[in-house]
Amino acid sequence: MNGISPWAAAAASELTEAEHTLFEHSAGAYHFKIYQTSDSIWIAAELPNGGNIAFRPVFSTGASLKISRIKINDAGIDLWLNGIAGAFETHVSIDNGDMPVLRYTTSLTPEKDLYIPFWPRDILVTTKNGKPENSEGQINANQWGTRSGFIYMSVTRPKSASILYLQNLTALNDYCQQTETSLGDSVGGNWPELGFALPAANKKPIQAGKKVIVNDAFVAFDKVPETEPDMIRGYLNLLASIYLKMPLPETNYQPWPEILESGLKDLIDSPGCWTQVAGHQYFNAYVSDYNTPPEIMVQLAVLLPLLDYVEWSKRELEIMKVIKEGLPAFFDEKLSTITRWLPAAEDKLEGEEEQKQPGVMDSWYLHHPLLNLSRLALKGDKVCEKLFLDSLPYAIKVAHQFNYQWPVFYKMDTLEVIKAETAEGMGGEKDVAGIYAHVMLQAWELTKEKRYLNEAEKAAATLQGMGFQIFYQANNTAFSSGALLRLYKVTGKEMYLNLSYMCLAGIFRNTQLWDCNYGYGKNYPTFFALFPLNDAPYTAAYEEQEVFCALHDYLKHAEGVDILPSVKLLIAEYIRYLVDRAVYYYPTMLPLDMLEEKPKTGEVDPKLWIALEDLQDGWLKSGTVGQEVYGAGNAFGILPRHYLQVPGEDFMVYVDYPTSGFNGKKGQNIHFNLLGDARLTCRMMIVKTGKTKLPEVIVTTSGNQEPLPSKNVKRGNIEYILQGNQQVVISWRKS
């Protein structure tokens, strides 16, 4: 039996006695009834097999809530009410799709300035007899910090429904701006009292006579999952079904070719980006951080995006030679492996953090450089191939020592565990098994030796049962998803496809599906931002740029594979928003007053086109961790993936969705496929690269031979809005 609060007990009692139904509506196997009680409006949902759950769009303290007006339509009801707190307006709608989606939006216009010291949550799980304390269920995942305001849960007694609840926190910005509150952890609770509660406003009140949104919830319903793969697929499908109903913010075109040139210049010329050891130059991890020895991860995290750009642009960059020359010095002959810290400078470590000690390895730090070395090796780099192959026996020894379940920190020589778990009872770095499988797949591709494929399969199998807890670090979880998809294609085993979905679910569970427009947050977009760690309080440039590239690769590997439509939709939308958002990691794009003056590491130079590590909640300054040199790959990853070059012409084709099958031959029409979902749109632009006027361009899409409408925009470019998941044909003639 569950414990409940007095508010839940009172609500359950009133709901049980409520007889007059304001509105009824059925959608599939779900039946909805709307009731008024003394202080609330309730939407009671009757679930299959006798389950019951109630949602509260309106709450007003005191038994004085009165309806002044009702408007009913086919799929919903609008109510105007008055209470002690002021005037309420609520709109309820129910979509009749395969997965019904309930939405309720409520505003409050206070009669007086109001402090809000407490607000009850808006979900109450009950039973057929109105006993919430007797209900049973499972919370599969929910909001942490300022991530999406959601709960994904299953009602298990009676076994009746799986439910994804998502609060559109963007709508609550005005409330937070007035009251100086944050929307972090605003969705949560304990069974059976769950959902959203207004952040307690004790510092400043909401203002009299000014309408504010106090609730904007989307709720999608499905059957209870039988297995872990069912649970993961259900989450992805429910999330996509809600996403299609959400009000989505507009994006803007960012001039990435110019941004790249600014970033490249500062990366090469800024002394704060470099340090010198034993005659070699190395990147610092953070601008002007000269106290920490060079790290191999940092060098390779910049080198690989530079390589993407060089292959796209056919441009030679001396900086790449400088980076490569310093890589062999990271190999420890005694241990026969690459190491995290440059051995020649390891004595600079002062041990102020657990991992900042000589000979201590953070588990993922071994595999991430190996993955990047393998990519270079597969492109024919013999130095990187030797470093990679020579380090593999050590990596395999470590994997066997820990039985494919890596701790957080261990000693490289003795394999003694320094820190076993990320938090008590949470285990170690769970997604390392996935990135290790990726490394082994790369080794198999490079050498054709079956033992590496066997290692990949053994590691991947250990990921079963981890659910949403698989996510430790965003980029590694994203790399894991691609490796598991590749394993599925190689072996045909459905388990690996399901595990790849598990990794993606972990990614999307750690995103921010709302725009933080209060405080400093008004200066940059945050919609669909991704958090780097499962408990990180901020979003980070480096992890986002690597996830962006990994998700592009996932879609490439998925060609010819019947993957979930929800996965195609969510990946394409994450990419679309990142291509706009990513520019705001550069401090040059932000006002000075929101930048931290004394970061944890190094310094923040507001004039430098080097990304901040962190963008924080709207009430906090950003750049508190530092300005990360290893996040410099931002523009170098975006340009080759979103700017399609047209041979012999003074223009490029920019698309903010992922694409495939681009063929650009001199003098011929351009053909390519837009990925994503046809129910959503993306931006395509013809971007001038010369001084001459753009030619007359004609754009058609599959199934529609009529030319698409265009719009002339800044810099002489031409813009088109296209639907996803279709073929695009571009032709032109000189004007």
Image (cartoon, rainbow, N blue to C red):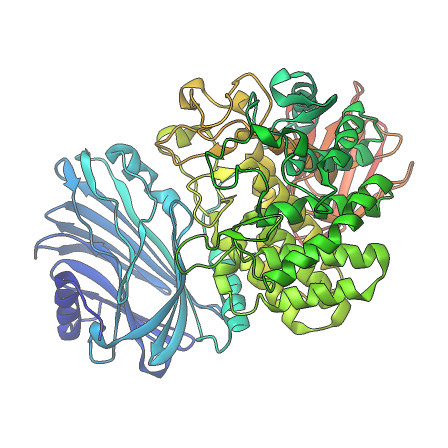
Q: Is residue 543 left or right of residue 493?
A: left
- Residue furthest to the bottom in view is 49
Position of residue 357 measured from the top left corner of the image (x, y, whole percent): 53, 38
When asked about the image quadrant of residue 732, the answer is top right
Q: Is residue 192 left or right of residue 422?
A: left
Q: Nearer the viewer, residue 117 or 630?
A: 630
- Residue furthest to the left in view is 63
Q: Is residue 307 left or right of residue 106?
A: right
Q: Nearer the viewer, residue 418 or 183?
A: 418
Q: Is residue 296 visible?
A: yes
Quarter of the image that includes the C terminus: top right
Residue displayed at 38% across by 33% down: 618
Residue displayed at 23% across by 58% down: 70
Above/below status of 452 relative to 266: below
Position of residue 239 measured from the top left corner of the image (x, y, whole percent): 49, 59
- Residue furthest to the right in view is 667
Quarter of the image that includes the N terminus: bottom left
When asked about the image quadrant of residue 55, the answer is bottom left
Q: Is residue 710 visible?
A: no
